[in-house]
Amino acid sequence: MKYYFLMPTARVNDIELYYETAGEGEPLLLLHGLGSSVRDWERQIPEMAKSYRVIACDVRGHGRSEKPPGPYSMSQFARDVAGLLRALDIPSVHICGLSIGGMIGAA
């Protein structure tokens, strides 16, 4: 018997972005650092999910998201994240970014 595990992804711009959600309440977007993934947040998500609807994604070229040829730009990362939020029907969020994730959130 084969088992298939579906990863939550959203088609955004020209790629599939991997994301995770947890909790309920006001949305809180978590953006990881350069060369990393949503795993940066694995210990914080359960605690944050007690108060927020947490959304964490692997940005283009990272983690379980697609990795098309680069180079990538900050505006491209920001457009991808905005596209993910539109796909999830989330009009506004609180943002918590680590390293380049903070720069993406500010872009």
Image: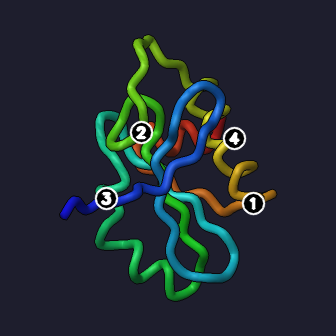
Please name the amino acid that badge 3 sits on: Tyr
Quadrant of res 25 = bottom right
Nearer the N terminus, badge 3 or badge 4?
Answer: 3
Of residues 70 and 18, which is closer to you in this image? 18
Residue assigned mark 4:
83
Identified at 44% across, 37% down, the residue is 100
Residue assigned mark 1:
90
Residue assigned mark 2:
65
Label 4: how many Cα within 10 Å (few below 14, some 14–19, many 20+): some
Quadrant of res 83 = top right
How far is the residue under mark 1 from the one under mark 4?
A: 10 Å
Quarter of the image with the N terminus in it? bottom left
Residue assigned mark 3:
4
Nearer the N terminus, badge 4 or badge 2?
Answer: 2
Q: Is residue 61 above or below residue 36?
A: above
How far is the residue under mark 1 from the one under mark 2?
A: 20 Å
